[in-house]
Image (tube, helix red, strand yellow):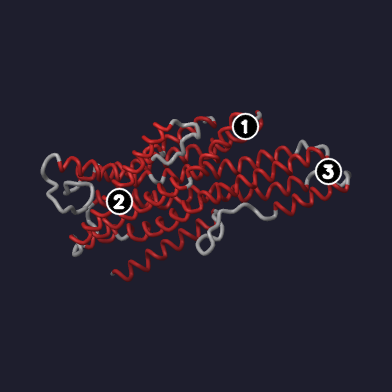
């Protein structure tokens, strides 16, 4: 089954619509911008009131370790959602320019460029579609918890008023259900980040293909200029999504460690299933970005190899200098790194991240027991 570039953009845009983090077009009307902002801040306020109610619930149930752990996990997912929503809101102008440039390049792409882009889309489409539905399933699973569990609401948040009367019960249930789905689907923001990283890698690969057609110094100079533009674009993406990656890494580690304790201390199979889904989401979440980040490293360094394979020895001294400059420039790959936290996001880092997370869980389990 093949997917088009336009379909990939449309699917990713719709997958994050519940959180209103996809940047509107620069020519969007003021009325539409206002409605988007009202929904965004309303959702954010819902999440913060839910967080306070969960904190109160943890205090009320402080003698029940199982409820404490469940409430802590729900609270952590809401914190992750809040951080990602605010980061996307603060980076709206940067994301606007990145995404609009991406859409323009896709529209104007030559046939060979469209083929490369569609190769990337089909490489990651099944993974992104499966995980997006998995993220929504995790949220819906929590929202429908009272159907299968001996509790009247999706979580154990506590309020300073009676929640059993009508319509208070329905309002509280709606708030908890909506926040649960939004918090779980905050992971779809990682699909949005992955899309940008995949596209940056694809641009380097498109340029690599252009090197095969270089026949003179003019074409080489043009490719060097284009290489500089792509480097600038990729660095802009890295700078924009860095905080999102950090939030995913930190929160995912905490979720794996803490939610793992649920499997030890609870006897309810429905609760175990809820947190099994949450753990699977947490484990895969960082992989979503590690895979395209690894590709970005490989493609940005492959430009130097493509330049070296040119027939530059038989050309002018100026062309020699340009090729040497390009090779030297490509020796430093484009990496998504955060000093003190992530040396360079890659599949190697992802494996070490999993190893460390499960080590933390093992240690915590030994301490608790």
Sooner in the amino-acid sequence: mark 2 or mark 1: 2
* 221 with respect to 143 (left or right): right
Q: Nearer the viewer, mark 2 or mark 3?
A: 2
Q: Earlier in the sequence, mark 1 or mark 3?
A: 1
**Rendered view: 124 above or below 115:** below
Q: Residue furthest bottom?
A: 367
Examine the image and state in which quarter residue 310 appears: top right
- Contact between marks 2 and 1 (CB within 8 A): the answer is no
- Kindly identify the residue that appears in the image at 47 percent across and 37 percent down: 126
Mark 2 and mark 3: span between their CA atoms?
61 Å
> Which residue bears the numbered disc 3?
311
Dot 2 and dot 3 residues touching (CB under 8 Å): no
| Image x and y of residue 21, in percent | 42, 41
Query: Residue 48, labelled with which disc?
Result: 2
Instruction: Check disc 3: other Cα within 10 Å, few if <14, some if 14-19, many if 20+.
Output: few
Q: Residue at x 41, y 37 (%)?
A: 15
> Image quadrant for the C terminus?
bottom left
* Residue 95 horizontal/vertical position (percent): 51, 42
Residue 289, disc = none
Q: Secondary structure at mark 3?
A: loop
Residue position marked by numbered label 1 in the rendering: 115
What distance separates the C-alpha of mark 2 from that of mark 1?
Answer: 45 Å
- Measured in 3D between alpha carbons, the distance from the residue under mark 1 to the one under mark 3, in whole angstroms, is 26 Å
Which element is circle 2 on? helix
Q: Please tell me whether residue 112 is drawn above or below residue 96 in the rendered image.
A: above
65 relative position to 209: left or right: left
231 and 74: which is toward the camera: 231
């Amino acid at each position: 089954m093949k997917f088009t570039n336009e379909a990939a953009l449309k699917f990713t845009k719709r997958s994050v619509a519940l959180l209103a983090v996809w940047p509107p077009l620069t020519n969007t009307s003021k009325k539409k911008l206002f409605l988007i902002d009202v929904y965004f801040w309303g959702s954010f306020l819902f999440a913060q009131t839910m967080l306070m109610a969960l904190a109160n619930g943890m205090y009320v149930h402080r003698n029940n370790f199982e409820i404490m752990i469940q409430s802590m996990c729900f609270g952590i997912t809401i914190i992750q959602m809040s951080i990602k929503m605010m980061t996307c809101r603060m980076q709206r102008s940067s994301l606007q320019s990145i995404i609009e440039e991406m859409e323009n390049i896709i529209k104007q792409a030559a046939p060979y460029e469209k083929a490369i882009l569609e190769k990337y889309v089909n490489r990651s489409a099944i993974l992104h579609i499966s995980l997006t539905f998995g993220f929504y399933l995790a949220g819906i699973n929590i929202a429908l918890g009272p159907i299968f569990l001996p509790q009247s609401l999706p979580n154990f948040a506590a309020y300073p008023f009676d929640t059993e009367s009508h319509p208070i019960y329905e309002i509280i249930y709606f708030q908890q259900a909506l926040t649960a789905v939004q918090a779980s689907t905050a992971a779809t923001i990682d699909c949005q980040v992955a899309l940008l990283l995949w596209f940056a890698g694809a641009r380097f690969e498109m340029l690599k293909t252009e090197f095969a057609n270089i026949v003179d110094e003019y074409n080489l100079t043009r490719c060097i200029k284009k290489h500089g533009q792509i480097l600038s674009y990729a660095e802009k993406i890295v700078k924009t999504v860095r905080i999102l990656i950090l939030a995913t890494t930190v929160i995912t580690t905490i979720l794996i460690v803490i939610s793992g304790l649920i499997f030890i201390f609870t006897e309810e199979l429905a609760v175990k299933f809820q947190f099994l889904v949450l753990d699977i989401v947490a484990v895969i979440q960082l992989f979503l970005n590690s895979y395209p980040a690894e590709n970005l490293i490989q493609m940005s360094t492959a430009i130097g190899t493509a330049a070296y394979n040119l027939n530059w020895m038989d050309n002018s001294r100026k062309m020699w200098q340009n090729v040497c400059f390009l090779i030297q420039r490509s020796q430093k790959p484009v990496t998504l790194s955060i000093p003190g936290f992530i040396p360079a996001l890659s599949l190697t880092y992802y494996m070490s991240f999993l190893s460390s997370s499960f080590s933390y869980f093992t240690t915590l389990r030994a301490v608790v027991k």
